[in-house]
Image (cartoon, rainbow, N blue to C red):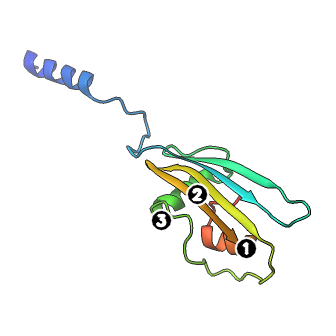
Amino acid sequence: MPRIAVLAMAAAAVLAPAVPAGASGAPESSLRLTLTYPGRDNSGTRSVTLRCDPDGGSHPHAARTCAELRRSGGRIVHDPDGRVCTAQYSPVVAEARGRWRGGQVNFRTKFGNDCVMHSRTGSVFAF
């Protein structure tokens, strides 16, 4: 192989940006997801973290949730999924704070009950 071609390949290898294996090129996304149940005797707050690109965090369904968020362009709330929910009022407040692909996320919505929340948010708050 000619010496110039070898030098060109060596220079390209040195100048190539270092990208970790499996990196998607998208900015990392990291959200703190919180559920609060106001008005319940055992009212409390539950929180998890969700990281995407690469997928992880303490969310029990991180890969599925990140895939849903990618498909929706980062939208947390969408049209109901068709499940039948009761009209029982047992409010839940869902919050998401952090970053999604470089943009700031400050989401907070009160749903009438868990079923309605899951119908509108998929696996995002399924923890």
Q: How many marks?
A: 3
Q: Quadrant of the C terminus?
A: bottom right
On residue 65, which mark appears?
2
Report the residue at 62% width, 60% height from top. 124
Q: Is residue 46 left or right of residue 25?
A: right
Labels 2 & 3 near each other (Cβ < 8 A):
no
* Mark-to-mark CA distance, 3 and 1: 20 Å
Amino acid at circle 3 = Ser
Along the viewing direction, whichever of 77 and 15 lies nearer the viewer: 77
Helix, strand, or loop for circle 1? helix
Residue 126: x percent and y percent? 69, 60
Q: Is residue 91 left or right of residue 96?
A: right
Helix, strand, or loop for circle 3? loop
Of the two numbered discs 2 and 3 on the same chain, state the one appearing first in sequence: 2
Report the residue at 18% width, 24% height from top. 9
Of the two numbered discs 3 and 1 on the same chain, state the one appearing first in sequence: 3
Labels 2 & 1 near each other (Cβ < 8 A):
no
Along the viewing direction, whichever of 98 and 23 lies nearer the viewer: 98
Along the viewing direction, whichever of 54 and 79 lies nearer the viewer: 79
Amino acid at circle 1 = Cys
Q: Where does label 3 land, which residue?
A: 72
Q: Is residue 40 left or right of residue 114?
A: right
Helix, strand, or loop for circle 2? helix
* Mark-to-mark CA distance, 2 and 1: 17 Å
Residue 55 versus residue 96 in the image, above or below: above
Q: Where does label 1 land, which residue?
A: 115
Please tell me how crowded label 2 is: few (under 14), some (14-19), or many (20+) other residues with Cα within 10 Å.
many
Residue 64: x percent and y percent? 58, 57
